Amino acid sequence: MALWLAGGGWDVETIDFSAVGLGRGQENAPPGARVTWRVEDVLTADLGSAEFDLVLVLYLHLPRPELVDVLARSAGAVLPGGHLLVLGHDRENLIRGTGGPQDPDVLYDPELLGTAVRGWRTERLERMDRDTDSGTAVDTLLFAQRP
């Protein structure tokens, strides 16, 4: 995603705990891509305050208290008028037997994500089906704009 955004002209800052994963991104970055690669733990990383036009939280599955904290800090990093996009495996996958972690405490649902942005303009908050090799999985998507 970082390279796709950078290819579209965005200045991108990405955080991941995996130096290997970020290294792969760096290796595939086209010349001139404006990406800052940060190997950090999102639980303790400084996410900034009202600094970004767009913040993405993608498939980050943590125990609820930790996830709620990261989502609040991610929302706080969005500039007024900017957007937060959160996407991850939904709890309904446990019923369907497809996709993602099998611990209900780390899976998403619309109610959880909706509480992350009270007072924001929610543009999309929904469960979405996604085809996989093992069947149809469900993801939860939040896309919201900060007032």
Image (cartoon, helix red, strand yellow):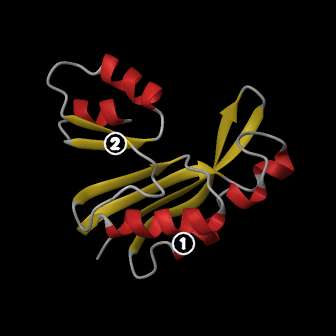
Residue 92 against residue 134 in the figure, above or below: below
Provide residue 132's location: percent of width, then percent of height. 69, 31
Q: In which quarter of the view is residue 140 placed?
A: bottom right
Q: Amino acid at mark 2?
A: Thr
Q: Is residue 54 left or right of residue 64?
A: left
The numbered mark, 2 or 1, whose residue comes first in the sequence reads: 2
Q: Which residue is mark 2?
A: 14
- Residue in the image at 58% along x and 60% along y: 126
- Label 2 neighbour load within 10 Å: few <14, some 14-19, many 20+: some
- Label 1 neighbour load within 10 Å: few <14, some 14-19, many 20+: some
Q: Which residue is mark 1?
A: 114
Residue 25 against residue 131 in the figure, above or below: above
Q: Are marks 2 and 1 in contact (CB under 8 Å)?
A: no
Q: Secondary structure at mark 2?
A: strand
Q: In which quarter of the view is residue 108 placed?
A: bottom right
* Quadrant the N terminus occupies: top left
Q: In which quarter of the view is residue 119 placed?
A: bottom left
Provide residue 57's location: percent of width, then percent of height. 46, 52
Provide residue 121's location: percent of width, then percent of height. 38, 74
From the viewer's side, name the closer residue of 10 and 43: 43
From the viewer's side, name the closer residue of 33 and 136: 33
Q: Amino acid at mark 1?
A: Gly
Provide residue 7's location: percent of width, then percent of height. 24, 29
Count of marks overlaid on the render: 2
